[in-house]
Amino acid sequence: MLKPGVIPSVEPLIRVGIVLPQDEQKKITTFLSNMCDYEMAVDTLTFSTCEVSSILFTIENNAIVFKIDGKSYEKVNKVVFRPMVEDAHITLDPVISGREFHWRKYISVKLPGTVEIKVSDGRLLVINELSLESYLMCVATSEMGAACPAALIEAQTVVARSWMLANVEQKHIALGIDVCNDDCCQRYQGLNNVTDVSRKGTETTRGMVILYDGKICDARYSKSCGGKMETFENLWENTPLPYMQNIPDMPEGHTVPDLTIEENARVWILSNPKEAFCSSATIPENELKHYIGACDDEGEYFRWTVEISNEELSANLRDKLKLDLKEVLDLQTRKRAGSGRLLELGIVYHDFEDRVRETVVIKDYNARLVLHPKFLFSSAVVIDKVGTGDVPKRFIYHGAGWGHGSGLCQIGALGMSLKGYSTQEILSHYYPGSRYKKIYK
């Protein structure tokens, strides 16, 4: 596993969680690329897979159960598939994509490297161990589509490598993995979307990262900033990162009004600033599906509108905040960050004894979590109430961007690459002051 703060001098191996205990998945089927391509270890036993094409693994009574060659195995702790040839891969089905997000779905994934199937607290845990560069080759065109220009693919690869090696968050370290396979870390769908473009992007940038003050940048990124990038401290810990600034996603010289002022934020979010690299004027929304990841929804990313009934919103608030909440009276955008995203959201409501109550939700992620049961696209929103009387019937969210908006804006970087900007120009725009450097061969 990776170690925080250590800059490797050789390519490391990493461990990626493919199925996590939180998925509460009880079954997984493996399909081997070629039957003799793997060695299979079952606890302390090791044997060839030459007579095996697929195996269904089930979790029962806190153990792995499966059948092979007519023989049943019922009290197994761990199964490991080790590749015996270079191009071997294992297909797993089903695997969640979009875990805990509104685009959640099940897919099959083709995985290179070693695959471990084990039990964790009575639930399935599947881990893929592979080289970092093999992983990155898959990430680039899982996050964005293979039709993207080379400069975008290369920039995405450098950013993904930097984020991984900075190794700051370590969200899943208790499971013995560096990252998971999904959007809470980085989207990794194995070999599903690998193309010559993604292979070349990885080879061209091999070992390249962005550094600031001698440290690898914690290079976070999102799908669309909405036209202005957000600072690190307004989204996560309150310690600023100098290379994540609140600047327009536009060519140098363009400015954006102060979006911490409510009147400015409303005008900005309800407008369509054409100068932005991520705007629908740069890349029309109906053309985005050609470029974005295969598991992304086709829709509006730069500006969008979502409606929700009072009943649906109230149920979500009861679920997420455990409030004694009967109905919502008002949603108040009390404090905004520099990109227009919410820093403080006031919620005024009736409890079940019809007393007026209020609570405050802080920061982008929590606002998105409570405003919609499917996790709102962005918290850079203008909120309108619909209905007569004191209790609105529904709320309308007019929004800007898709995701947290800090660091690389993927659709903005796509816009830059389509306009002819180079990989290094894209990285310098989204991580100002950073330095591009090769750390291993």
Image (cartoon, rainbow, N blue to C red):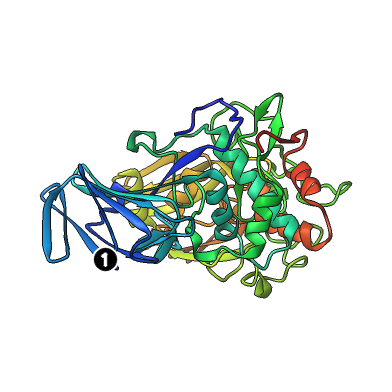
Q: Is residue 271 visible?
A: yes
Image location of residue 195, percent across then percent down? 60, 65
Image location of residue 108, percent across then percent down? 39, 66
347 and 431: which one is in front? 431
Disc 1 element: loop
Quarter where residue 89 is shown: bottom left
9 and 107: which one is in front? 9
Q: Is residue 344 above or below residue 276?
A: above
The reply, left or right, for residue 65 in relation to residue 227 is left
Check the picture and name the quadrant holding the C terminus.
top right
Image location of residue 429, percent across then percent down? 78, 44
Dot 1 crowding, Cα within 10 Å, few <14, some 14–19, many 20+: some
Image location of residue 338, percent across then percent down? 68, 41
Q: Is residue 262 above or below residue 166?
A: below
Circle 1 sits on which residue? Answer: 52
Residue in view at x 38 percent, y 66 percent: 34
Q: Is residue 55 above or below residue 251?
A: below
Which residue is the extreme one toward the right? 253
Check the picture and name the quadrant holding the N terminus.
top left
The reply, left or right, for residue 395 in relation to residue 305 is left
Q: Is residue 273 visible?
A: no
- Amino acid type, mark 1: Val
Residue in view at x 54 percent, y 65 percent: 193
